[in-house]
Image: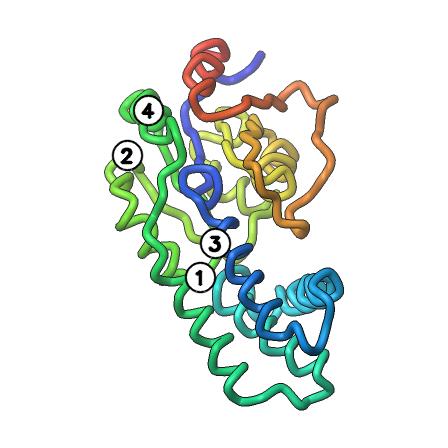
Amino acid sequence: MTSPLRIIGFDADDTLWQNEVFYRLTEGQFTELLADFAEPDHLSDRLLAAERRNLKQYGFGIKGFTLSMIETAIEVTDGRVPAGVIGRILAAGRDLHSHPIEILPEARTALEHVAGRFRVVLITKGDLFDQERKLAQSGLGDFFDAVEIVSDKTTDTYRRIFSDPGPEAAMMIGNSVKSDVVPAIEAGSWGIHVPHEIEWAIEAAELPVTSPRFRQVPDLGHLPALIDGLT
C-alpha cells in the first residue's frame, strides 16, 4: 500500500526561478571574448569538458563556472590569454550574482497549494551564498518549512532529507531528470519532472518512464491537480 504523501521537495533553479538562461548569456559573452582563438561550438565543447572535470573540485554554481571559463581560456590560447580578457571573464562571473530573480510562471501558485498541507522543503545545490541570495530575493522563503542547500543530489541525499516520515511518503519536484527525479525515485519517493526550455548538458538523463513513481507535468500550473490526484 502506498504511504500517504506527507513531505514535498522542490528544486529551485529552473524549477521555481530562471537560472540556466543567465549562464547561457554569460557563455555567449565568453565566446565573443575568445572569438580570435576558437570557434564558438568548439569553445562551448571545451568549456563543458572543463565543467565536467571541475565539478568534484569546485562543485556546482557560479564560482566553478567562472573558474572553468578561465581554465578554458588558458587552454585554447596555449597560455597566451591577455590579462584583460581574464579580467572580463571575472567580471562576467560577478555579473551572474547580480541578475534579478525571475520567478517562473505558476511557481507561487504551486507553493500556495501545498503550503500548510504538507511539509515543504527547498532542496537545491550550488554555492551556499548564491542560493541563499536567490531565495531571499525570490520572496518565496515563507512557503518552506526547511531549506537544504547540498553539494549534490544523490539517492542518499533524498533518503536523509526524507527520513522523517520516510521516502515513500515524499515527493520531489524539479526540472532535472538526473538530479531531481531519478535519485528521488531510487530512494523510494515520487519523482515529478517539470521540464525547462533550457537543459544543461550535464543534467541530461533518460526519463524513468517505466517507474510507477514517475510523473511529468508540462509546467507548475499542472502540479496542484497532479498532487490532488495522488492524495
Q: Which mark is residue 109?
A: 4
Give the residue type at disc 1.
Asp
Q: According to the image, label 3 marks what residue?
A: 22
Q: Looking at the rendering, which quadrant does residue 99 occupy?
A: bottom left
Q: Secondary structure at mark 3?
A: helix
The residue drawn where x is 66% and y is 83% is 74
Left or right relative to 223: residue 118: left
The residue drawn where x is 53% and y is 89% is 83
Residue 218 image point, x, y percent: 54, 23
Q: Can you say whether 81 is above or below 134 in the image?
A: below
Q: According to the image, label 2 marks what residue?
A: 143
Q: Can you say whether 2 is above or below 144 in the image?
A: above
Q: CA distance from mark 1 to mark 2?
A: 21 Å
Left or right relative to 213: residue 160: left
Looking at the rendered image, the disc whose residue lies closer to the viewer, 3 or 4, is 3
Looking at the rendered image, the disc whose residue lies closer to the viewer, 3 or 1, is 3
Give the residue type at disc 3.
Phe
Q: Are marks 1 and 4 in contact (CB under 8 Å)?
A: no
